[in-house]
Image (spheres, rainbow, N blue to C red):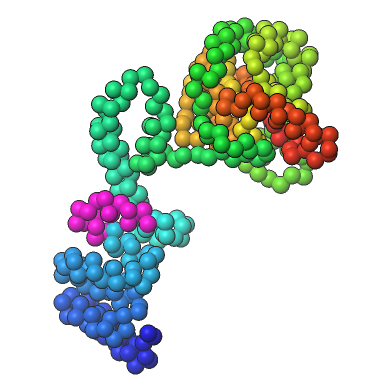
């Protein structure tokens, strides 16, 4: 029931008297006046917050808790009420509940640019507290799981580790983001286990020969290197603008959109032979694509996702100076010359070369290992029919790796 004008006016007067009592250092008198104000009109969260402050000064923790709960009963997302409850819980050593409440505070907090300096410092302390609690929880869980992990022997633990890390706030789980065809019900694996690709050692064994051909291309200034990013004229600025039409991220294509680049393959016979031994993806007018990816010094490829999860991207590192890195989802790896890996490019990924030297990788695409042979054949037919009908779901340019 709404309060009458008289009771609201009485509450305002009692609240003003309570504030004066606080200013005079009489917290007990202030608490009494705030309680009377709430009795006259308990629908204003500010009255409950004032009572909580008076109780805090009186070291009446349970009175403060009750007052804060009164404010939150009116507005469960009230920023200051949540903040004061988080402070109270942390002060009382109720760390598990304080963790939950501080997380709620940060969810409803004003954006950083709108925070006064005092509030910014307080929320920075809150973030540090949450990080400490997350680390403590993680350490306790790691210790508790040590025996079970040892008993698991050589079992694959990546998925278990990722689940636990996400549960304790040490990482985020990334989902597929497909700009084109999204094949459902596939595992969204960031880096695929090597067991899915028994031919990887054969590809890796050709590293020296492949690298020698690339070095020859670079040394002799061979034609064929093009900017990897080439946006249409007049396109609005995006995160790709710094790389647009720039050889900072360059490509030398050996296969492109399912077609061989004959001149490049003839120039690089060892690389051509290595690719011929790989079961590359085959999608009409779209895949396979294979190319030397050149990342110039001090270049960053921004976070992005690919077009379809029916394929897997493979990297064979060829030239890797210190200071280069690659992140897919929640896992970051360093390239190591001659050690290939496979990943799902529809999971957010980024790369960087923070060195003063060039970084080079052979990139190629193969089928997602979880797609069956029958499914592959149906997908190939789907794209042929879609193209012939003039209603293809994606352009071939979308399939750049």
Picture layout, residue 386 above or below residue 38: above
Most extreme residue toward the front is 374
Total marks drawn? 0
Question: Residue 268 sits in which quadrant?
Answer: top right
Magenta stretch: includes residue 98: yes
Q: Quadrant of the C terminus?
A: top right
Can I make out residue 320 in this image? no
* Depth order, front residue of 266/26: 266
Q: Quadrant of the N terminus?
A: bottom left
Query: Residue 389: x percent and y percent?
Result: 83, 38
Residue interval drawn in magenta:
87-104
Residue at 28 percent across and 41 percent down: it is 137
Residue at 36 percent across and 53 percent down: it is 103
Q: Which secondary structure is most common in the magenta stretch?
A: helix
Picture layout, residue 184 above or below residue 356: below
Picture layout, residue 310 above or below residue 362: below
Query: Residue 149: x percent and y percent?
Result: 30, 26
Left or right, 184 with respect to 254, comes to left
* Depth order, front residue of 135/287: 287
Question: Residue 19 sits in which quadrant?
Answer: bottom left
Query: Residue 15: x percent and y percent?
Result: 28, 82
Left or right, 370 with respect to 58, comes to right
Can I make out residue 3 in this image? yes
Left or right, 148 with respect to 237, comes to left
Residue at 51 percent across and 25 percent down: it is 192
């Amino acid at each position: 029931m709404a309060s009458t004008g008289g009771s609201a006016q009485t509450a305002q007067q009692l609240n003003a008297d309570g504030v004066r009592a606080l200013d005079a250092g009489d917290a007990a008198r202030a608490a009494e006046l705030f309680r009377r104000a709430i009795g006259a009109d308990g629908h204003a969260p500010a009255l409950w917050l004032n009572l909580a402050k008076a109780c805090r000064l009186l070291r009446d923790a349970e009175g403060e808790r009750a007052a804060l709960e009164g404010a939150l009963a009116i507005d469960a997302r009230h920023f200051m009420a949540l903040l004061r409850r988080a402070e109270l819980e942390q002060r009382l050593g109720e760390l598990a509940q304080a963790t939950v409440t501080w997380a709620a505070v940060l969810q409803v907090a004003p954006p950083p640019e709108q925070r006064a300096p005092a509030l910014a410092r307080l929320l920075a302390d809150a973030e540090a507290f949450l990080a400490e609690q997350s680390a403590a929880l993680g350490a306790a869980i790691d210790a508790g799981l040590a025996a079970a992990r040892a008993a698991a022997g050589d079992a694959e633990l990546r998925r278990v580790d990722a689940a636990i890390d996400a549960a304790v706030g040490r990482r985020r789980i990334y989902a597929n983001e497909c700009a084109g065809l999204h094949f459902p019900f596939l595992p969204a694996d960031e880096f695929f286990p090597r067991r899915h690709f028994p031919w990887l050692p054969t590809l890796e064994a050709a590293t020296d020969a492949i690298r020698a051909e690339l070095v020859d291309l670079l040394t002799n200034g061979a034609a064929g290197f093009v900017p990897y990013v080439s946006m249409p004229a007049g396109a609005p600025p995006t995160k790709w603008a710094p790389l647009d039409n720039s050889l900072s991220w360059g490509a030398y294509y050996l296969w492109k959109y399912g077609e061989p680049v004959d001149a490049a393959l003839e120039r690089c016979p060892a690389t051509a032979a290595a690719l011929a031994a790989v079961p590359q993806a085959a999608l009409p007018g779209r895949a396979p694509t294979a190319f030397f990816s050149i990342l110039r010094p001090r270049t960053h490829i921004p976070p992005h996702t690919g077009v379809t999860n029916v394929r897997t991207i493979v990297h064979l590192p060829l030239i890797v100076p210190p200071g280069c890195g690659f992140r897919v989802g929640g896992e970051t790896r360093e390239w190591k010359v001659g050690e290939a890996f496979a990943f799902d490019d529809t999971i957010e990924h980024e790369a960087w070369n923070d060195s003063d030297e060039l970084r080079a990788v052979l990139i190629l695409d193969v089928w997602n290992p979880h797609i069956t042979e029958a499914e592959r054949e149906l997908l190939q037919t789907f794209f042929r029919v879609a193209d012939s009908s003039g209603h293809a779901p994606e352009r071939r340019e979308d399939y750049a790796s």
